[in-house]
Amino acid sequence: MNSSKVKVLVDTTYLLPILGVEVEGVEEALKALRELYVKGRIKLLYSPFSLLEAIGKISRAKYDARRVNEGITSIMDSGVFKAALPGPKAYVEALELRRRGFKDLIDLLLYLTAKQYGARFLTRDRELAEFLEREGRDLSVIMREEELSSL
């Protein structure tokens, strides 16, 4: 049943390996995501902002253009991931939160996009969670890797 699936918006960290960039320690989380997806327990979302952020990181290192192309195509066209775009309210709210002291606008947009979609935002960013907590924001949107085993 589609409504019982947990929507999970993945942070850029989890897209980088698909693009050919090794990220230390994400193997277990990626394996869990894959298993949950195959079992029909989750719906995977990505933000085009994560692709932009990933390309920025990749551009500063040695990369395999063919692998990057295959990865982007896989993310965008495989049907595994669905694109999640922020609405106007999320943009304005991200600006306000940035003004209140959190510098990473993309992470703020990802958090607010997840919230807008009724999704969980899978991230390792503890600074974001701490900032949101100080701001009295809804932390139930934030998902840690350890929580994947409970889905």
Image (cartoon, rainbow, N blue to C red):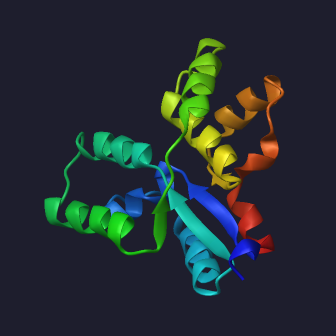
View extreme (bottom): residue = 39
Left of 135 or right of it: where is 34?
left
| Quarter of the picture holding the N terminus | bottom right
Q: Residue at x 30, y 39 (%)?
A: 56
Regarding residue 29, the answer to whether it shows in the image is no
View extreme (front): residue = 88
Regarding residue 46, the answer to whether it shows in the image is yes
Task: Say which quarter of the image contains residue 110.
Answer: top right
Looking at the picture, how far across and down is residue 92, in whole percent? Answer: 58, 23
Up/down of 56 relative to 67, above or below = above
Q: Residue at x 55, y 38 (%)?
A: 87
View extreme (left): residue = 65
Task: Say which quarter of the image contains residue 130.
Answer: top right
Looking at the picture, how far across and down is residue 12, in whole percent? Answer: 47, 50
Up/down of 81 relative to 57, above or below = below
Looking at the picture, how far across and down is residue 121, in whole percent? Answer: 65, 51
Looking at the picture, how far across and down is residue 37, in whole percent? Answer: 59, 79
Nearest the camera: 116 or 72? 116
Up/down of 72 relative to 124, above or below = below
Q: Residue at x 74, y 48 (%)?
A: 141
Q: Residue at x 30, y 61 (%)?
A: 72
